[in-house]
Amino acid sequence: MKTSQYLLALLCPIILLSSCKKSDDEITANPKSSFTIEFEHQVNGAVLALNTTTYKNAKGEDFKINVFKYYVSNIRLSKADGTAYLVPESYYLIDESKSESKFITINKVPTGDYTKIEYTIGVDYALNFAGAQTGALDPINGMFWTWNSGYIFVKLEGTSPQSTAANNALTFHIGGVIDPNNTIRTFSTEINAANPLRVRTDAKPDVHFIVNAASLFTGKTDISFSALNFTMGGANSVIVADNYTKGLFRLDHIHN
């Protein structure tokens, strides 16, 4: 009996220490948190207002915007040491007509300081051939070509007096993933190392992007609406995608 009591007395502290260590490890191991991305839509520095405000393109031609929406997907965060985190199943449809869509929350992100953010403008290659999906990728959102088995990556519709289309319409539906008309593009930006994206368990940062809708019509090629006012994939969509690749998004600031 005394031997058993002696062994028990020796084992109890070990068990307690092991239990405490496991508990502490579970609390501190791989902590995760969240942050928000805000997309502010503009047209060459002016607030984007659907259906009402008249803007000018790089050719000095007037135009109005009635529809403006696009996909942001495959969000990837990188740290200064080169390690990266790819947000799983990250597909978001940003729609100017739905203000809530311009704020997206990224959950379960490993804590740390991130100095680079990148994402796909559109939907990745595989999902364009996987058929219609659900959620942000549901065809009900009007961003899926049922006749072409693929997604519209960026959609802008409006009017311009210079458009030769019926009712002076502007129809820019950018999509397609097959070369030479592949319009999948990636946006990437470095974050100032002095003020990185600080993901913490006790704070929820906000990353603020300015989105310039007019970038569809200038950049690599200045577009005149008398010559190009309609595209649904194909070579003309490549022209537009090449324009907005660098000009559509700009990191404005981060609230940590």
Image (tube, helix red, strand yellow):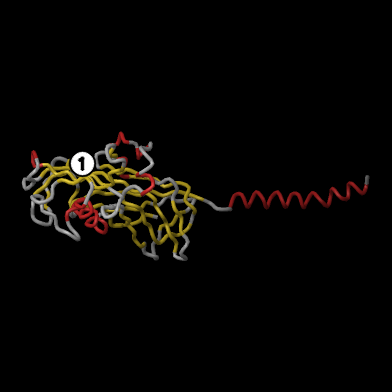
Q: Is residue 248 above or below residue 148?
A: below
**Residue 114: % across, % down:** 43, 59
Q: Nearer the viewer, residue 61 or 33?
A: 61
Q: Nearer the viewer, residue 192 or 247?
A: 247
Residue at the extreme front? 179
Q: Residue at coordinates 36% horizontally, 39% vertically from top-left?
A: 131
Q: Residue at coordinates 17% horizontally, 59% vertically from top-left?
A: 221
Q: Can residue 98 be seen in this snapshot?
A: no
Q: Amino acid at mark 1?
A: Val
Q: Can residue 197 be seen in this snapshot?
A: yes
Q: In what element is the residue under mark 1?
A: strand
**Residue 171: % across, % down:** 17, 43
Indicate the quadrant containing the N terminus: top left, top right, bottom left or bottom right: top right
Q: Which residue is mark 1?
A: 67
**Residue 206: % across, % down:** 37, 51
Indicate the quadrant containing the C terminus: top left, top right, bottom left or bottom right: bottom left
Task: Kindly indicate the quadrant of the structure image that contains residue 142.
Answer: top left
Q: Residue at coordinates 76% horizontally, 49% vertically from top-left?
A: 15
Residue at the extreme right? 1
